[in-house]
Image: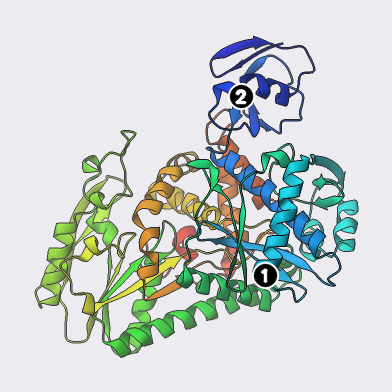
Amino acid sequence: MTITAKGQTQEFPDGTTFLEVAKHFQPQYEHEILLASYNDMLFELYHTVPGDGEIHFITGTEKIGQSTYERSAIFMMLKAFYNVCEDVKGFGVVVDYTLGGGYYCYLKGGVKATPELLQKVKAQMDEYHKKSIPILKKSISTREAIRIFRENGMASKERLFHFRMTGSVNVYYMGNFVDYFYGYMVLNTSYIKYYDLIPYGDGFVLMLPTRSNPEKVAPFVPLNKLYEVEHASSKWAAKIGCSSIGALNEMVMNGYSDDLILMQEALFEKTIGNIAMDIAQKNKKIVMIAGPSSSGKTTFSRRLSIQLKALGFNPHPISVDNYFRDRDLAPLDENGNKDFESIKCVDVEQFNSDMLKLLQGETIQLPRYNFFTGTREYKGDFCKLGANDVLVIEGIHCLNNEMSSSLSDDDKYRIYISSLTQINVDAHNRIATTDGRLLRRIVRDNRTRGYSAKSTIAMWENVRRGEDKNIFPYQESADVMVNSSMIYELPVLKIFAAPLLFQIKRGDPEHAEAKRLLKFLDYILPISPELIPQNSIVREFIGGSCLDVG
């Protein structure tokens, strides 16, 4: 059997495993090999190599490798917790969301995440690492999986598999501890070397390495404002009994989709109204709204404007996107590609000049950016401010002082908005907030810009890098944070996103990501978009909004 990896070819006997091949080629890799990709398919290392071909080995520097390491570390952490707290009635661990570079988790059964408990659990994890416990995948019937998770008190997993369409499911064993995970695992616990547990808030944070440095635990960065909004969203989802996909599916199945949509929209409207009241009381003239891609900044700014009107103000919604420079003037990144997320894509000088003129009572003509042609246009959109007028400005760079350097800080009210998914697949499998935003963007890009899902996925990595550089460093400077995720939106986005994802062909570099998203969407029962109000933030992506959101 002839195998090629890293440009080198080697003969191996039939029946050789990916692990044996990985050991041969490991010296050619700077970091430890975690997975293998063969003929555009991913394999855990225990699998037998099917035959001649080229293998791409995956380390923690790649997204799928990082996810595999993190998932495996969570599995080992859970085994350690359930072992240390095995006598606690009703004990459980919930892996809730990312925070400060790690995973925020909390404990059930009245157990507090004290430094002493976390130290015991970490010591237990160290023992598991030293023992090189195999992580074994086993295919069992869906009925058997439901029974196992019911007996182990894992209700969210039991609920999830009630909606499983296939008759079997893959579960993982680490010794006598069994769990279900949405994704791949490393071969054994010897691979899980770098981790830390840090008490924070009502729980703790599991810290793991980053892609840029897979051999070092990332430092924890407390983000108190982000924690508060994430924590509130998670508590609300639990309060209404909808904190997992299984629970969401039950609500859809039982005909409560309308109630769920109305509850979520009422809560969001209340949030917007409270912010408008705060702006009015503080007599702010400039509202700056920032957030990562597909957070719903445009819809939020329009709805905030309506709330301000109800208070007697005259708001002027302005999108920084309309101040983009022509596409052919976009700066290049370190790889020579156009960096559309850079603040240098924005005509900052013109923006500041226009805003100052408005605040001084002058009339200006606002631009409109044509995303199809990649040019800025003027079509007679004139604007002049009166005594009770407020500028409501939205764009990814709005919390960056460079964006509005000519405007007085005393006049500004800063808002950070992001789609922070408040439900998870189950208690141990979180839904990445980036997945929700990516699905939003796939649907909107196709509808408004004519982009394929393949194109959107291809540029997503650059978008994410731009967010890390241009948005997230400024989020804690906001006066208020807003979660724009709608608890019902994934069942709606599924209807629009799935057909677009199926268009991506095997062999395309984006196929693995499309397959992963489709597998994730397969867990979810759909909700008809007809039930969604016309002013909903979801309408910005699927269409049918009564607001001017493009």
The quadrant holding residue 108 is bottom right
**Viewer-proximal residue, 525 or 2?**
2
Q: Is residue 114 above or below residue 388?
A: above
Which residue is under mark 1? 113
**Viewer-proximal residue, 470 or 27?**
27
Residue 416 shown left or right of residue 363 in the figure = right
Percent coordinates x, y for residue 32 in the rendering:
60, 32
Instruction: Choose the circle earlier in sequence order: 1 or 2.
Output: 2
What residue do we see at 37% from left, 59% from top?
473
Residue 506 seen by the camera: no
The secondary structure type at the circle numbered 2 is helix
Residue 311 shown left or right of residue 535 in the figure = left
Percent coordinates x, y for residue 309 in the rendering:
32, 84
Q: Is residue 105 above or below residue 451?
A: below
Q: Which quadrant is the N terminus positioned in?
A: top right
Q: How many marks?
A: 2
Which residue is under mark 2? 26
Percent coordinates x, y for residue 91 in the rendering:
79, 69
Residue 329 shown left or right of residue 163 in the figure = left
